[in-house]
Amino acid sequence: MFHLETGEELIKKTKPHSASFLSSRMFWVGVLFIFLGIVGGFVSVSNFIRVFAVGIGFLLIVVSYLRRVSAYTFFLTDHRVASNYSFLRKAYREIYYDKIIDVMLEQGIFGKVCGYTDIWLYGYQNRWIVGRMRGVRIGDSRIIVNKAWKNKA
């Protein structure tokens, strides 16, 4: 879906930070299932239910990683920022830097520890755009913020 336009330069093609799935609800539900499966050994619960709970927990953790990290690709150019998503559905979003009205960075506990942030892009391009890029590395977020505000400062 992503194609460079005439005169446009690709600055960076990147994926979300590999630890960004840690802030996913699905990850924490998976951890809860694993915990309940392990603790179930101390309570009178059948081995089948314990193994099933641990298996579901690992499955949820793997799916959260695939959904949050592997499915996204970010393209940072000198004119726009684009994200391509492909996991059970396909989604493509792009916004030109001159169409961005506001940029908000949101960094949780895991983001501070691991070095990533979520970026919210607000702008108007054919219709209102509110884009969220999850797990953007700190260096990549600086590229986006600097490019977005280079003509407005």
Image: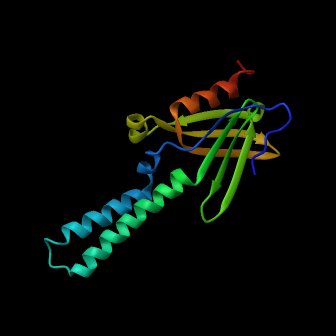
On screen, residue 97 above or below 86: above
Question: What is the x, y in percent for residue 102?
Answer: 66, 33
Question: What is the x, y in percent for residue 28?
Answer: 37, 57
Q: Is 119 left or right of 150, judged from the image as shown?
A: left
Residue drawn at point x = 52 percent, y = 53 percent: 68
> Residue extending furthest right?
6
Question: What is the x, y in percent for residue 3?
Answer: 78, 44
Q: How many marks?
A: 0
| Frontmost residue, 142 versus 75 | 75
Q: Is 83 left or right of 106, judged from the image as shown?
A: right
Q: Tell me which corner region of the image, top left, top right, bottom left or bottom right, holds residue 80.
A: top right
| Frontmost residue, 102 versus 144 | 144
> Residue extending furthest top?
153
Q: Tell me which corner region of the image, top left, top right, bottom left or bottom right, holds residue 33.
A: bottom left
Residue drawn at point x = 65 percent, y = 45 percent: 131
Q: Tell me which corner region of the image, top left, top right, bottom left or bottom right, holds residue 48.
A: bottom left
Q: Is 4 left or right of 71, judged from the image as shown?
A: right
Question: What is the x, y in percent for residue 34?
Answer: 29, 65
On screen, residue 16 above or below 48: above
Residue drawn at point x = 43 percent, y = 49 percent: 23
> What is the quadrant of the C terminus in the image?
top right
Residue drawn at point x = 64 percent, y = 31 percent: 144
| Frontmost residue, 95 versus 100 | 95
